Structures are given as structure tokens and as C-alpha cells.
Amino acid sequence: MPEFPTFSLTRNPRRGLAAALLLGGFVCSALAHADDKVIVLDSGEAQLSLIDEASRTVVGTEPTGKEPHHLMITPDGQSLIVADSVSNDLMFLDPHTGKVQRRVEGIEDPYQLGFSPDHKWFVTAGLRLDRVDVYSYNGHDVTIAKRIPLAKTPSHITFSSDSKIAYVTLQDTGEVAAIDLASQTVLWKLHIGNTPAGLWMTPGDKYLLVGMTGEDDVAVVDPHTHTLVKKIQTGRGAHNFRNLDDGKHVVVSNRVESTISILDYTTLTKVGDITGLRPGPDDMELSADKRYLWVTFRFAKHVGIIDLTTRQLIDTIAVGRSPHGIYFANRAPVVAPNPD
């Protein structure tokens, strides 16, 4: 049995992750709000920027903890979690307005975070602490199941579609690790190259794509045989992914090359590049109509907007230092109840 406590809203509404995750497991209708915002994390400013999507202007900022890097919508769509890695806390926002709902302290080094597809697990990667924390989640409460030492510098996370395995990249050892969520044990590790970062699983869990930030390519891993299948040359500093939701293509940001490559994940080939960008493209999000790709320029204090029909950068928006995670309120998911 875990030696760590279960946190519940009925015990103390200001303590513990479960206090912030009172999700109930009900279906959330993702209706657009008139005041929907695009939320961008300015990691170097300890703040987030609120952008009006229609006018493409910053309409406000909100203080966060130190070094907010990544964000994640809760399974019911009611809250957007901002992970403050250096402040060791989570901030919960209204996903439509950016208004702060609550803060939860004592979550150590949450650089990256994610819910398993079945919502039974909540996982954080501690880049600074060389650790992955696995929490069980029952729709109301969470319990820390295990803190797993995982050297060195665990960064990005993705899951198998059956929610049995969490995959984590280890930047400084050049590996990808597979964690069995039920037993909280490391199943296997595979060395794939220099500084692996972003992860994306192709449909059917056929291949795991890994952005190789220390190289100029994307590694293709077979998660079933634990082998490196091939590398797809993209651009220097291949980093993070965004599915284009067209049943065929995914894009990867090349942070050093300052380009975005378009990959056909059915053939595992590169089919094009988006060039003419600002320095350091990083996280990306797709507009609801799938026409525009928004991207944070980590080294340029701007967010860019790309027209996917022309593959051209058509606008930029000045934000704070080191913009990283980005979220569109009008793309909040409609989710089913947490299965028993």
C-alpha cells in the first residue's frame, strides 16, 4: 500500500491535488464562450498572457508561479491546469477566461503533466528532480501511488491508448522509458539518441514519434518490440508535435532550425516544411476550424499564426519572455465519464 495520503476536498479545500481535481466524472459540453481566450505561458516572466483569438491581441496577463512550462485540461473540461515547475505547485484556471480558480501547493517539480486516457492516472515529470510521480485518480480524489526515480531529466509524457503505459523521454541520457502504471515500475528503456523531448503516438499505438532536440530528426520507435525503427530528418532541434486532425499529418517544431516540418504518419515521411518563422518555435495549437496553427516562439517573445492553406506565417503577437505552453479554450474536449 502507498505510504502517501489520499487528499479529499472534504478534508481541507486548500490542500492536496484532489481538492483541485473535484471533477466528478460527468460529461462536459465544450460550448464556445464569447470571452474565450487563447492562453500562453510566459515561462521566463512567471506569468501567462491572455490573447483574444479574433483580434489577435493580448488583452491581459496573470501572475503564475515560477517557470510555468506546460498545461493540461482536466478530464471534465472545467479547469486548465498550469504546472509551475520551480514553485512546486499547480494553478487551476477557468479555461475560457483565464481566471484563477485555485492553487495547489506541494506538487514537486511538475515540469510536464498528463492524464491517462481513462482518467485513472495523473502523471508529472520532474525534469529538475529526475523523477516521475504517478498519482491514482478515481474521479474525486487522487493518491500518490509512487515516486519513481528516473534519471536523467525526464521531460515529456504520452500514454498508450489503453492507459496501461506512460512513455517518458529522458533528455540527458538520450532514452525513452516505458512505465507500467498499474505497478508503477519501469518496463523498459531504449537509447534513441541526443536529447529526446516531445512524444506523439500514432493511431493504433503503432509507432511512438520522438522529437530529437539534440539532433535534426524525429525518432520512430516501435513500442511493442522496443526498437528504433528509423529516423525522419526534419530540422535542427526537433522538439514537439501537434496532430493536424486530418487523419494523416502531424507537425513537429524544429526549435534550432526555426522551422516546422509536416510529417505523414501513415508513411513515416516528411512531406514539407514551414519556413520564414521567428526563432525557437516550440508548442503549437490548432484553431477550431483547423486552418490556423498557432506556435510559441521560445526565443523571440512572440506567438505566431500560420495559415495552413498557404503554409505561411501571417501574423505575430508579442508576449512575455520564453513563451512555452499554449491552449485554446474553444478546443476544450467533450469527455465521457471516468470508467469504473
Image: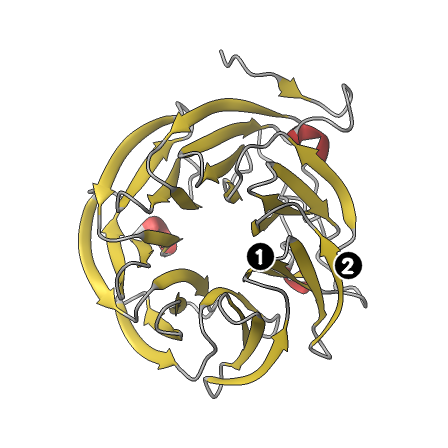
Is label 1 in a helix, a strand or a loop?
A: loop
The mark total stands at 2
Side of 252 relative to 47 (left or right)? left
Q: Residue 73, how many percent across, how many down?
A: 62, 49
- Residue type indicated by callout 2: Thr
Which of discs 1 and 2 lies nearer the camera? The answer is 1
At x 32% / y 29%, what residue is drawn? 186
**Image quarter of residue 7:** top right
Vertical side of 142 occupied by 160: above or below: below
Is label 2 in a helix, a strand or a loop?
A: loop
Vertical side of 154 occupied by 30: above or below: below
At x 32% / y 55%, what residue is drawn? 210
Q: Is disc 1 surrounded by few (<14), some (14 to 19) or many (20+) residues within 10 Å?
A: some
Name the residue tied to disc 1. Answer: 44
At x 59% / y 79%, what residue is drawn? 316
User: In which quadrant of the rendered image does the C terminus lie?
Assistant: top right
Name the residue tied to disc 2. Answer: 97
- Residue type indicated by callout 1: Gly
